[in-house]
Image (cartoon, rainbow, N blue to C red):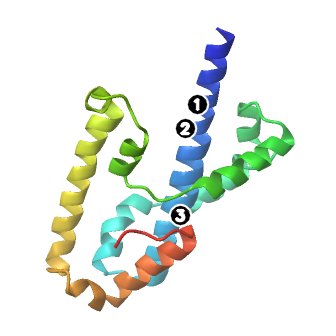
Amino acid sequence: EVAKAGWRSSLGASLTLKDHLGHLHWVIANGMMLAAREQTGRSHPLRRLLKQHYFATASINNASKEMLLPVKGFGFRTFGFTDDSWVQYFADVMAQWVWRPLPQRIADAKLPEGFAETFPVASDGLKVWRLYLKYVGAYLGVFLPDAEALPADTEGVQFWASFETQIDTPLPP
């Protein structure tokens, strides 16, 4: 029972602090929001598409930095870390981040044969992933009808370059 409780606590900390707070909020959402707001105009189709996904990101991330990050703060008191390990944990979380699309993340997990088809995060997640790809492609296709139009979209190119720089990771073309 002690080992199970320790495993559940570790998993909860990892999902909450690493995957959700560190990677999703501080890296992906923050990088996307800054790149969109700094590199694209108000009416640029990419910014209009992304706005609904980064709305209030700056205030949410700022509040999390003030409330969750400090040693002795709310986040620290919620999880079982020492002062030094709390700081080191977030340094490790940020150093470990790498962009991997959902299909690659599932493949890299090396799940047992047939498990991904029954695991909702994988089976349903891939359905949602494909739906988003179709939606984004259809939306942006109205404004950028073919692959030759992409390099000519200077704001889109600047967005991509800025996002890559902020997350310090090359993104797929």
Q: Residue at x 49, y 81 (%)?
A: 38
Vertical arrangement, residue 41 with respect to residue 127, above or below: below
Alpha carbon of mark 1 to alpha carbon of mark 3: how far?
23 Å
Question: In this figure, what is the number of numbered marks?
Answer: 3
Alpha carbon of mark 2 to alpha carbon of mark 1: how far?
5 Å
Split into 4 quadrants, where in the image is the N terminus?
top right
Quadrant of the rendered structure where residue 75 is?
Answer: top right
Q: Nearer the viewer, residue 42 or 90?
A: 90
The answer to whether residue 69 is left or right of residue 156 is right
Vertical arrangement, residue 110 with respect to residue 171, above or below: above
Residue 77 visible in rendering: yes
Judged from the image, the secondary structure of the residue bearing numbered disc 1 is helix
In percent of width and height, residue 130 lies at 22, 51
Crowding at mark 1 (Cα within 10 Å: few <14, some 14-19, many 20+): few
Quadrant of the rendered structure where residue 157 is?
Answer: bottom left
Looking at the image, which residue sits at the far right?
83
The answer to whether residue 148 is left or right of residue 105 is left
Q: Which residue is mark 3?
A: 30
Q: Residue at x 28, y 91 (%)?
A: 152
Front tag of 1 and 3 = 1
Q: Which residue is mark 1?
A: 12
Quadrant of the rendered structure where residue 43 is?
Answer: bottom left
